[in-house]
Image (tube, rainbow, N blue to C red):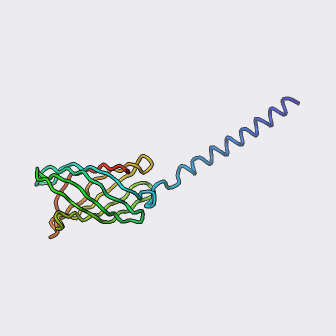
Amino acid sequence: MKSRIASKCLGSLFAVVLTIAMAAPAHAEDPVCSLARSAGKWSFTDQGTVLPIGPRTAVGVFTFDGTGNLHNGVATSSLAGAVASETFSGTYAVNPDCTGTISVEIFASGTEILAVTLSIAFDEDMKHMRGIFTSAATPNGTQLPTVINLDARKQ
């Protein structure tokens, strides 16, 4: 009798464990990144080189609105030693696999100086973002080769 009860309990326990184990992988594949979850104020640094001009670094803040618009971008940058105050705005996209893109126009003293696109990736539950500049162009369309990375954190 005792062995029959133990056998039933063991069988029930096995069924519960199997059900949980099968459900976990399905949950792990659910999308974790979205436009809505990206919303908020972000602080960032970028660093690298604009060829053939020289090294670039910048620090600033911007806001993702959760619907694909980047607003209120302000930064202080240095390009080959020339320091400037910048503003920027644009659009962004977020994929369910936590990758995405950003496209912005950068202005200094109210004049557009660059149009930039970046490939990005989110980690740390969408509280941290890394990126790389994929293109940079002057207002007249001149492409500037870049090797610049981005590091941003949600405030």
Q: Quadrant of residue 36?
A: bottom left
| Position of residue 127 in the picture relative to residue 138 (left or right) | right
Residue most extreme to the bottom: 140
- Say which residue appears at 48% left-offset and 53% top-offset: 32
Placement of 19 over or under 100, stated as above or below = above
**Percent x, y of residue 76:** 20, 54
Is residue 33 shown left or right of residue 74? Answer: right
Name which residue lies at 29% across and 51% down. 44
The image shows a total of numbered marks equal to 0
Judge from the rendering whether residue 123 lies leftward or rightward of residue 21; answer left or right.
Answer: left
Residue at image location 37% in from the left, 52% down from the top? 121
Q: Is residue 48 above or below residue 108?
A: above
Position of the N terminus by quadrant = top right
Instruction: Provide residue 41's location: percent of width, then percent of height.
Output: 36, 56
Q: Nearer the viewer, residue 10 or 80?
A: 80
- Give the residue at x 33% y 65%: 91
Q: Residue 22 location, x and y as percent?
A: 63, 47
- Residue 118 is left or right of residue 12, and the answer is left
Please identify the residue farthest to the top as the structure is shown. 2
Residue 99 image position (x, y, % from top left): 39, 55
